[in-house]
Image (cartoon, helix red, strand yellow):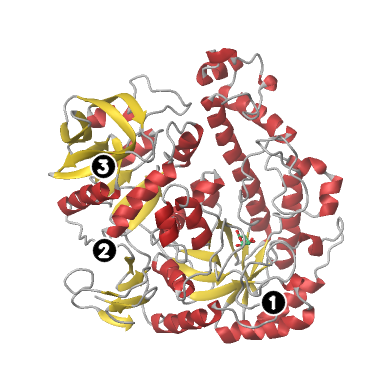
Amino acid sequence: MTEQSFMGGFSQLALGVCYYPEHWPEEDWVEDAAQMRALGLRCVRIGEFAWSRLEPQRDQFDFGWLDRAIATLAAEDLKVVLCTPTATPPKWLIDECPEILPGDPASGHVRGFGSRRHYDFSSTVYREEAVRICSVLAQRYGNDARIIGWQTDNELCCHDTAHSRSTAAGQAFQLWCESRYGNIDDLNTAWGNVFWSMEYLSFDSIELPFGAVTETNPAHQMAYRRFASEQILRFHNACCSALEEHIQNQWITHNFIPMKDTQTDCFALAAPLDFVSYDSYPLGRSEFLLGRDEPELARRYMRTGHPDYTAFYLDQCRGLKNRGFWIMEQQPGPVNWAPSNPRPAPGMVALWTLEAIAHGADVVSFFRWRQAKFAQEQMHAGLLRPDRSQSDAWHEIEDVVRVLNILKEESLPQPQAQVALVTDVSAQWVSDIEQQGQGVEAHRVTFQFYRALRRLNVAVDIVSHSADLSHYALVIVASMPIVSETLLEACEQSDATLLFGPRCGAKTPEFQIPPNRAPGLLEPWLNVKVNSVETLRPDVTEPFEYQDQVFQSRLWCEDLTVADATVAAYYQQSRPALVRKGRCLYLATLTDDAFLRQLLGDLLKEREVVICELPEDVRTMTRGSVTFAFNYGATAYTLNRLSDLPLNAEFLVGDAVLAPRGFSIWRSE
Ligand code: GAL
């Protein structure tokens, strides 16, 4: 259950922008700030890549320009979010300490200077440098009322930087292994190193799991991923502590990329933060998710993003700290980094902004103020073009400002959900390491359950395996090969209906088959055992019957022995596809969306949760008594008082006809 919003110094929903004063002549700043205010923006994020201007040479700081930029923004009553610049160590630092640079896992080559994120999370030299610059900044600006808070670094792990094949990483991994396993025989046993004669004689001979002839031991890879995640946390926690030591009445956040891309335990990463921020780029990222496996969907939603894709991450953001979040970067037009970079359909920038708010964002900040006229992102839109003329997004933001003015009278508590989807980074690790079948990936499986739930018009909390589950009607663990005792205790404390997807419980924490076979710790809950698993070609589906209807199984199919439990559906002639024991269900196969909607609909109705199947392109989301409805489609849709529109709905914005790529907002007590 989400506790509270995080307004971070604002008394109502607010908009902001990402700004790079160091990219523009100082004489432009006054007009920039005045225009930001005139547009209705309230906060400005600055400084995340500015190390070379803040400290042009070691210990020679230049804060003059930053002081003047902050003063210029503050003069227009714009609040500043100041960033630590650790995503871009400057050239002098790399020349002084080249060991900061990370190693490319695939090739082993040093990932050199000349872009960004060129540092190794295992470099103790860099950790000290990062802490040093954070401390210097916090000492100077930590008590400055014009600065409401801090963003750490920028998009940790972006550009595949979670993993490194450097000397520093290798040495740190050996020490990590020693502290986890204690003696080398235990490590060899835990990993099963007798297989292929992979046994080690000492910790200092352990290799990183890269660059071998064929796949390295999955247990070795798993240990490395755990280690890498902990290194990232250690680096980030050190930066947060350095800030905390000096700041007063300021908050700390970090701008996350899609959680799966961090390869990190994001719940732990969020722990030292006051709230989570997210960088929302619906088009390119939706293309990455759908482009390969569902090209027809990717084509259809090329200019809008899939209707559930962005929301999937928005709900993850809310779940990371169980509270409201910010969008720190919102896509304003075509970006420059996806395989193709279409223009958003007219209306989408406004729709995405309000959708973020509907899912619990309290502030949305656009990336970026003005399109850069030099360097890597010249092709990336901003709110202004390089010559200061207004880009397409400008008028949509004016519309959003008008909507926020209407909403300021409303109380907007965080969304409340009766359904929880439980996730854990280990699920992603297992499916990355041992995919077994093309297209079988934990986050895709979880997304499929999510989108089925959203089509049924229910709100979803995405929570960790250690979350309190007691207030949910339905708890879904879509993909979790490593099931923890903590999760099972939380399941026991709750009376929710529990649905486990295929492969749940199939691995021990050390990446072995559990002694009692899959589903391991879940066996007593379900009285099933997995005999074997097959995976299917992505272009093959096979029919199965459930409730007298025919659905399709796909990709991953288990053969189960069922003891004392009910088989609710069979497939492949006589194989159990869905098993139920009391309030607990286990699904033996991945399926089509239609089956998930049918099953989840049945389970929700059983628990008296109100559902209503929405059209493919329409979604709604509720905060308190205010509901937002969005139409991702190219044709208008009329909401219906008998199904998706409450009888007592009073429109605040729009009406029952949702325009293409449009939205309506109503109050219903
Ligand atoms: C983000 C990043 C920004 C900018 C933007 C372009 O991932 O944080 O610095 O590069 O992408 O879309």
Q: At which x and y percent is residue 407?
A: 39, 80
Label 2 crowd (10 A; few <14 / some 14-19 / many >=20)? some
Q: At which x and y percent is residue 165?
A: 69, 35
Could you tell me which residue is drawn at 31 percent across and 62 percent down?
A: 616
Label 1 crowd (10 A; few <14 / some 14-19 / many >=20)? some
Which image quarter: residue 577? top left
Q: CA distance from mark 1 to mark 2?
A: 42 Å
Could you tell me which residue is drawn at 59 percent across and 75 percent down?
A: 43
Quadrant of the image containing the C terminus:
bottom left
**How many numbered marks are there?**
3
Residue at numbered disc 1: 386
Q: At which x and y percent is residue 609?
A: 20, 57
* Ligand 1 within 8 Å, label 1 CB: no
Considering only vertical position in the picture, is 151 above or below 270? below
* First in residue order: circle 1 vs circle 3: 1
Disc 2, SS: loop
Q: Nearer the viewer, mark 3 or mark 2?
A: 3
Residue at numbered disc 3: 552
Identify the amino acid type marked 3: Gln
* First in residue order: circle 1 vs circle 2: 1
* First in residue order: circle 3 vs circle 2: 3
Considering only vertical position in the picture, is 477 above or below 196? below
User: What mark, if any, has residue 172 been given in the picture?
Assistant: none
Residue at numbered disc 2: 614
Kindly indicate whether the residue at mark 2 contacts the one at mark 3 (C-beta within 8 angstroms). Answer: no
Disc 1, SS: loop
Identify the amino acid type marked 2: Leu
